[in-house]
Image (cartoon, rainbow, N blue to C red):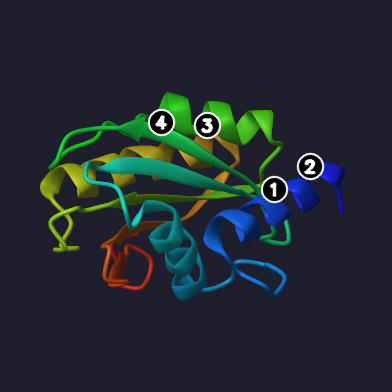
Amino acid sequence: MYVRELHARYRLRRLCGWSRPLGPVTAPREAARIFVALLKDEVVEVGGLLCLSARHHVLAYHELSRGTVDATILHPREVFKAALLTNASGVILGHNHPSGDVTPSPDDRAVTGRIAAAGVVMGIELADHLIVAADGTYLSFKETGLL
């Protein structure tokens, strides 16, 4: 395991207030737990990215954008710049909906399709896209068949 992976995992544990080690992120519920812990107190939409190793360990968390109360910009260029800089094999995209309604908008669906297509070209898998709310509810594009 690389030193930066250990540092990223330690930092996420500290930020999220967890006492147990952060293992591989293999299920949407595990990724949602991370995104909820990081984004639950945000009053505007914030887009973030978990960069994953080949074994789905978290290499890094990167905040992609801060938006308004009902929108944020997620662009493939920013997603894959962060992924390439961390040597990620895969990524999990996530953003919050401050309204508490995790239903994806047409824009959420469109950007997910663009990022997934760019990931195929780049050789970096978009493992999932999650929309989270402060109360812990989430929607996984992978679980719902939207990805």
- Whether tag 4 and tag 2 are in contact, CB under 8 A, the answer is no
Seen in the picture, residue 147 relative to 11 is either above or below; the reply is below
Residue type at tag 1 = Ala
Q: Which residue is mark 4?
A: 76
Residue type at tag 3 = Phe
- CA gap between label 4 and label 3 equals 6 Å
Q: Which residue is mark 3?
A: 80
- Whether tag 4 and tag 3 are in contact, CB under 8 A, the answer is yes
Depth check, front residue: 99 or 89 = 99
Which circle, 1 or 3, is nearer the viewer? 1
Q: Secondary structure at mark 4?
A: helix
- CA gap between label 1 and label 3 equals 18 Å
- Residue at image point 66% right, 42% down: 88
- CA gap between label 4 and label 1 equals 22 Å
Which circle, 4 or 2, is nearer the viewer? 2
Residue type at tag 4 = Pro
Q: Secondary structure at mark 3?
A: helix
